[in-house]
Amino acid sequence: MAFQEYGLSRRSSKENLDRFIPNRSAMDFNYAQYMLTDGKKGKENPAVPGSPGKEAYKKQLREIFNMNRTRILAFKNKPPVPVEFMPRDYAPVQPSKPVKPRRHIPKTAERILGAPDIIDDYYLNLLDWGSDNVLAIALGTTVYLWDASTGSTSELVTVSDEIGSVTSVNWAPDGRHIAIGLNNSEVQLWDSTTNRQLRTLKRGHTARVGSLAWNNHILTTGSMDGKIINNDVRVRDHIVETYRGHQQEVCGLKWSASGQQLASGGNDNCLHIWDQSMASSNSGTQWLHRLEDHTAAVKALAWCPFQANLLASGGGGTDRCIKFWNTHTGACLNSVDTGSQVCSLLWSKNERELLSSHGFSQNQLTLWKYPSMVKMAELTGHESRVLFMAQSPDGCTVASAAGDQTLRFWKVFGTPEPAKAAQKAAPEPFSDMNRIHIR
């Protein structure tokens, strides 16, 4: 009985057949005929051996034509020949990425100008470089203009001793008009091409105006009274919005490139992000984010030119950190301890680099590679803390002013990329002069 079962299992299995059936499609009939006729003569009935050269020739032919096989019948199909979807000779060669040569960064200033009577005050903003390539600097009660194209210097205005010193300067986007913040809480607007005062913004603040920032026709002012005010310079009643959030002096103000978000830093160690979508003219606008990670005053602010929601901020003497923020979420992305007071920050317009200026002990400018924050260079020469920095319109040169009463120019950033087609310019804030109320 067991034997019968074993026999049935053999007949039902494909692996254990009782006879062999050759697979004709897998056989080489020409080779089989040769092996059954001429090929067998050399093995079973050896003839008279030929010359060694002739035998070697036959052996080589057998190897070439694969005639060293001994099996005639084939019982399995030949394995398929592997197909190369792309022959190696035609495979695309990945070109090696060209290595960008390392840029030479001069460690010394290319030009040094005297800046007598500059106020050594961390909370002020006394230097700005306009889009018309004119640098404005406030020295005591006087604002001077230095034309970078010609190297000429001119005096724009000297305010009276009753008003006090100039506490901030900031060019309008057109590079022609400039706002001047004063110690007596007022702000003056000037036309630099005609040396004519256009108007004075009053009754907004109750203390000195140490920070200014333009957003098209809106001039934003920050004061020691802790308030931030948006002023529409086209209309008589210029105050259109007020931001209340800082408990001490507002020393840093920067609008994002889109004009949608405003960053403000204060002596209360707070950084605020304000959004235009939350604007309210009836009451104080609520901030989007209140960021309290810094442990000292926040003056240095810089929006990243290649990532719209990335903001860099720098802390004062007991903080010493540069922090990076996602202003959409309010998350702190990174924090770097620089070892000294951070006075100012500037992003490169041409490279992924950030420049910071510092106080004690080296009073240096430090160039960082972003996002690794590896130091690329340290520029020294100032003998006092480097309070102010401004960037040329082409992005290559940086001007720095310090308490040592010198103004230095550094060729720190790389050359600009080839200019692209110019976009349609936004309307100038002073394009309709008849609508500006002069008083």
Image: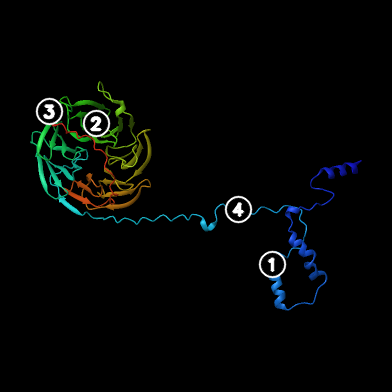
Q: Which mark is residue 248?
A: 2
Q: Disc 2 or 4, which lies upstream in sequence? A: 4
- Local packing at callout 3 (Cα closer than 10 Å; few below 14, some 14-19, many 20+) is some
What residue is rendered at 17% in x and 52% in y?
Answer: 112
Crowding at mark 1 (Cα within 10 Å: few <14, some 14-19, many 20+): few
Residue matched to label 4: 83
Check disc 3 and report its element: helix, strand or loop.
Answer: loop
Mark 1–mark 2 Cα distance, whole angstroms, equals 95 Å
The quarter of the rendered structure image containing the N terminus is top right
**In the depicted view, which residue is nearer to us: 417 or 296?**
417
Q: Nearer the viewer, mark 2 or mark 3?
A: 3
Q: Confirm or deny contact between disc 3 and disc 1 (CB under 8 A).
A: no
Q: Which-is-in-front pick, marks 4 and 3? A: 4
Percent x, y for residue 188? 13, 33
User: Which residue bears the numbered disc 3?
Assistant: 437
Q: Which residue is mark 1?
A: 63
Quick check: 225 above or below 325?
A: above
